Amino acid sequence: MKKVKNETTEVWVYKNINNEWILINTNKPTFNSKYIAAKELKMSTKTISKYLDTNKDYKGLYFYSFAK
């Protein structure tokens, strides 16, 4: 059996206001995981996964990941 590695995906969440990209989390440049982003934004991780890196907005928010 192969062990499953549980990887977390860091998530940057932006709003596009007047063609200017603004990070919504001003304290730090990222959420450490989809779970934390979903909890703070009151949405599901499934929604974040669906819109992650698609350049499509969900309720005015854009979700991007950073591959390490």
Image: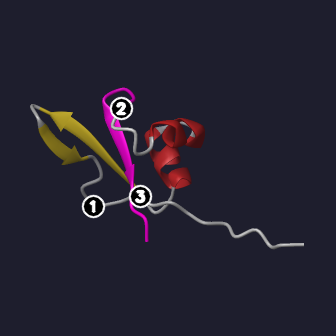
Q: Callout 2: helix, strand or loop?
A: loop
Q: Amino acid at mark 1?
A: Asn
Name the residue that disc number 3 marks.
31
Name the residue that disc number 2 marks.
56
Q: Which residues are magenta?
A: 56-68
Marks 1 and 3 sit apart, C-alpha to C-alpha, by 10 Å
Q: Position of residue 51 (x, y in %)?
A: 45, 37
Which of 29 and 5 lies nearest the eye of the viewer? 5
Depth check, mark 2 against mark 3: the one in front is 2
Q: Quadrant of residue 28?
A: bottom left
Q: Callout 3: helix, strand or loop?
A: loop
Q: Quadrant of the N terminus?
A: bottom right
| Label 2: few (<14), some (14–19) or many (≥20) C-alpha neighbours in 10 Å | few
Marks 2 and 1 sit apart, C-alpha to C-alpha, by 24 Å
Q: Position of residue 62 (x, y in %)?
A: 33, 39
| Label 3: few (<14), some (14–19) or many (≥20) C-alpha neighbours in 10 Å | some
Q: Position of residue 40 (x, y in %)?
A: 46, 46
State whether the magenta stretch is mostly helix, strand or loop: loop
From the viewer's perspective, is residue 2 above or below residue 9?
below
- Whether residue 46 appears in magenta in the rendering, the answer is no
Depth check, mark 2 against mark 1: the one in front is 2
| Label 1: few (<14), some (14–19) or many (≥20) C-alpha neighbours in 10 Å | few
Name the residue that disc number 1 marks.
27
Q: Quadrant of the C terminus?
A: bottom left
Q: Amino acid at mark 3?
A: Phe
Q: Amino acid at mark 2?
A: Lys
Whether residue 22 sits left or right of residue 43 in the image: it is left
